[in-house]
Image (cartoon, helix red, strand yellow):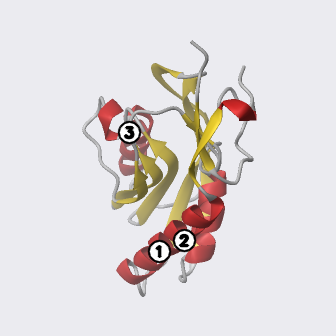
């Protein structure tokens, strides 16, 4: 267990807001004239996705899927899909919205699942990219920040289901 005294601020609420607005404008430009289908990966993406959809000036259909591979600070290596989307997306471009692209296992499994179900393309949109931890060859199509190998919380990201409600991104400083 940790407390807020063990969290170092990495990105402020204002920095995050500006970057998400910038990303929303880029997606708006790239998909002008098209309808978007966004699927958020629960639970971590919910804060980022809420801000992102408000920053995109296009018609949007959205849903959520729940998939988990982390327990505490460790990836189990197994992707567990608990809650699935019920939206028909055959022949459409789908944007998978995630809080962090880390090992790549979760997004790789979800991307393949959506393509198998008939999506014409699946784009990866992530708040954070942590390429140093990647074990699967997958890259985000859209990303707010690339970070080093740090354990971060806030803005939807958690440590044992805590700290998602922080309006900033912080690094957990674990006691050794």
Tags 2 and 3 touching, CB below 8 Å: no
State the quadrant of the C terminus. Answer: top right
Q: Is residue 84 above or below residue 136?
A: below
Of the image marks 3 and 1, the number of the one nearer the N terminus: 1
- Depth check, front residue: 132 or 52: 132
The residue carrying pointer 1 sits among few (fewer than 14), some (14 to 19) or many (20 or more) residues within 10 Å by Cα, namely some
Q: Position of residue 66 (x, y in %)?
A: 61, 40
x 39%, y 32%: residue: 105
Side (left or right) of 4 relative to 171: right
Snapshot quadrant of residue 120: bottom left
Label drawn at residue 22: 1
Residue designated by label 2: 18
Residue designated by label 3: 148
- Depth check, front residue: 62 or 153: 153
Q: Position of residue 73 (x, y in %)?
A: 55, 22
Residue 158 visible in the picture: no
């Amino acid at each position: 267990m940790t407390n807020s005294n063990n969290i170092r601020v990495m990105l402020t609420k204002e920095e995050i807001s500006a970057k998400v607005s910038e990303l929303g404008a880029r997606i708006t430009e790239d998909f002008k004239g098209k309808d978007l289908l966004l699927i958020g990966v629960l639970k971590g993406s919910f804060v980022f996705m809420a801000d992102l959809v408000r920053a995109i000036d296009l018609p949007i259909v959205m849903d959520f899927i729940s998939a988990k591979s982390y327990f505490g600070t460790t990836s189990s290596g197994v992707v567990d899909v608990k809650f699935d989307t019920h939206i028909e997306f055959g022949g459409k471009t789908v944007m998978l919205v995630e809080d962090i692209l880390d090992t790549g296992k979760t997004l790789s499994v979800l991307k393949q699942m959506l393509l198998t179900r008939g999506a014409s393309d699946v784009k990866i949109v992530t708040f954070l990219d942590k390429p140093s931890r990647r074990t699967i060859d997958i890259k985000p199509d859209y990303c707010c920040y690339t970070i080093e190998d740090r354990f971060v919380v806030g803005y939807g990201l958690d440590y044992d289901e805590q700290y998602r409600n922080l309006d900033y991104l912080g690094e957990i400083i674990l006691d050794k």
